[in-house]
Amino acid sequence: MQDAYGELEARGFLYQVTDEARVRERLARGPVTFYVGFDPTAATLHVGSLVPILAMRLLQRWGHRAVALVGGGTAMVGDPSGKTEARRLLGPDEIEANTRGLEAQLARFLVLDGARGVMRNNAEWLAPLQYIPFLRDIGRHFSVNRMLSAESYRLRLETGLSFLEFNYMLLQAYDFLVLHEREGCTLQVGGQDQWGNIVAGTDLIRRVRQDDAFGLTLPLLTSSSGEKFGKSVSGAVWLDADRTPPFDFYQFWRNTDDRDVARFLKLFTDLPPAECERLGALAPPLLNRAKEILGYEVTRLTHGAAAAAAAWGAACREFGEADPEHGVETSSGIRALSAGGSSASLPEVILEGPEAFVPIPVLDLFVRAGLCTSRGEARRLVRQGGARIGDRAVADETETLVPADAGPGTLLKAGRKRVARLVVRPAPR
């Protein structure tokens, strides 16, 4: 692992490369400016986005310059890659709000000081484009036959591909050309479903500027059980703490399938690959310590060390610590933590004032606590025996609870893993 390419390879980041020997040589020779694009289709990224984000972070550590491109322009079109149906078209105000959210999140992981990295928005050059000149200058370099052979388009031909979406490849290729001209960008990095778009960009640069450019794709992850990565029982796992609290974020990683531990440690933490392999090879029950380390490290990168420590401590107090004697060797900062102290990182549902004395249906309580997404889901949880208030199981789906009658800090539990705290404030603040 003598260079950036070697570490990408050792950690499992590589899927396809346009010219492996030349990309390896170029990354080893000196700083390369590269870019990754993120379309603002939501106000927050999800854990699947951590694969390209942490690949960017790794390349920056090796001295390469990152361009984080937010697709304020391409989001107006919608990327058909990896989709069986067209994306919902977003309005300008929603795209602008989403863009601000993504820019703030990316800035937490990357150095964006100009010299080592910059943030760009492709609306800057896509929005002013005039259609006819664009087709004459850029569109003439694209073969429709070749475009239709791209996997991102072939998958959609059966269900219907709009002409609007058909333009997406041209726009993404044009992004690469603009960044090549303005930023000296010679490498695009993206998910494996972006291969056709990336190759189109390298080809466009060669045709228009007679310059070399390269592409590198990252694996789109699924768990060993076949589930789409980043999905939990209650939906996507987001990087925004308001949508996925740090405790739930930690628990997502803590519940990783045994078969995925070593792979995820290499991808999503800074621990040395050899240590990741050793931790992933631990036999149960000590393998749970490796899962704690995974949860702590990814939560630390995403939400900070304090939030990670609090989430780990709260989980240990509720479910037990996997390695209380700290016998498993690790370079992770988790080794210095104690499971004692406050459990303030637990999600809370707060009922105060007159509301504290009004009976609330248990189904509504579990929904308000974020443990269930609907009354129907809460009803199924009760029927399956998975809903608990404190130490007792909820046996009747019609049950109500007067919050003020509950003990201080009563815990609401959905199954064995999801927990929230009931906070009652009888007097208004």
Image: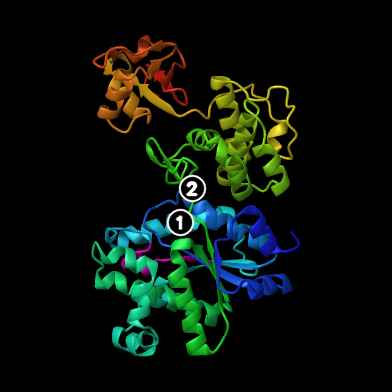
Query: Which residue was labeled with disc 1?
Result: 102
Residue interval drawn in magenta? 68-81
The residue tagged 2 is 47
The numbered mark, 2 or 1, whose residue comes first in the sequence reads 2
Any part of residue 190 in sight: yes
Q: Position of residue 342 (x, y in %)?
A: 58, 23
Residue at (41%, 62%) from the top-left corner? 39
- Relative placement, left or right, of 337 versus 148 is right
Question: Amino acid type of disc 1?
Answer: Leu
Return the x and y of residue 302 as percentages of the image width and height. Answer: 56, 46
Q: Quadrant of residue 211?
A: bottom right
Quadrant in which the C terminus appears: top left
Horizontally, is 228 left or right of 18 in the view? left
- In depth, the one of 214 and 95 nearer the eye is 214
Camera-side residue of 112 and 311: 311
Instruction: Tell me which corner region of the image, top left, top right, bottom left or bottom right, holds residue 150.
Output: bottom left
Magenta includes 76?
A: yes
Q: Which element carries disc 2, helix, strand or loop?
A: helix
Q: CA distance from mark 2 to mark 1?
A: 13 Å
- Looking at the image, which residue is at 74% across and 40% down? 331
**In which quadrant will I find the N terminus?**
bottom right
Count of marks placed on residues = 2
Which dot, 2 or 1, sits closer to the camera?
2
Neighbourhood count class around disc 2 (C-alpha, 10 Å): few under 14, some 14–19, many 20 upward: many
The local secondary structure at tag 1 comes to helix
| Image position, residue 142 (x, y; %) | 38, 83
Residue at 64% x, 62% y is 59
Q: Is residue 310 magenta?
A: no
